[in-house]
Image (spheres, rainbow, N blue to C red):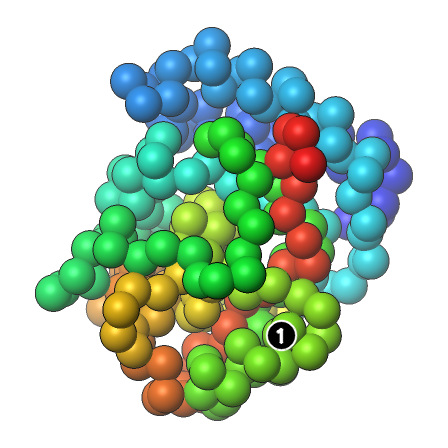
Amino acid sequence: MTTTLRTLELEYDRQIAHLESIGLTGTTSLPIHSFRRQARALKRRLGDLVVRARPDRLPFVVVVKQQAVPMEDAMATVTIRGASGIVNMDPVVPTDFHPINRMAIPPGDLYLLEQVESGRDTLDIRPEDALRMIRARRRSPLTIDEGVALVVQFPHILTDKRYFNCFQLPGSRRADQRIPSIWISYGRPRLGWCWNRNKHSWLGCASCRRRLGTDS
């Protein structure tokens, strides 16, 4: 993807249109007029993006918070090889997880992630160690909302083993060692969890450079 403002605008319009087409807007929690108003305001931030073109990095992703769209609804729109996504986090639920300390999440229902990576350099590394690596690179770990937003827009990340990978989301935690994770389980995209001190050769830790809201 080239990095001209016009190209970024076209990609932004695609992501916004995709959210509307799969039915994640126009709900009671996120009325269509509110969504479009926030989307117009957020689009004005595209000129503030710092883009570094790399095949293993996405310039930006539009995030819709789970306060506006439940994780179950969002994951159901993620389709890979004809199989739709699921949420299976027993014995916990997505709303149990909250951003960790030192995470500045923009207000409102929508915001942007800049320079998003799925964490190929953190494969086979424990999430608690990967978190230190991410912060040492002056990046920020993705939250559960952000991970779902990523696969809603780019489901191929879960199957593209050349540049991407399935991933964990150490930016969200509850009062234990569970880390939200997204991978392919029995042929279906799944939002589940793994342990903070377990490492997996097929799970990295996703991160971004920064977050931009309508007024940040």
Residue at point 37% right, 47% down? Answer: 78
Measuring from the top left, give residue 44's x and y in whole percent. Answer: 74, 25
Q: Quadrant of the C terminus?
A: top right
Residue 70 lies left or right of residue 150; in this view the side is: left
Judging depth in this view, the residue of 72 and 110 nearest the camera is 110
Vertical side of 91 occupied by 216: above or below: above
Residue at point 48% right, 62% down? Answer: 101
Quarter-of-image position of residue 186:
bottom left
Q: Which residue is mark 1?
A: 134
Quarter-of-image position of residue 55:
bottom right
Element assignment for label 1: helix
Residue 54 in view, yes or no:
yes
Measuring from the top left, give residue 126's x and y in whole percent. Answer: 45, 87
Measuring from the top left, give residue 67's x and y in whole percent. Answer: 34, 35
Measuring from the top left, give residue 115's x and y in whole percent. Answer: 70, 56
Quarter-of-image position of residue 111:
top right
Q: Residues within 10 Å of mark 1 (few under 14, many from 20)?
A: many
Residue 154 lies left or right of residue 90; in this view the side is: right
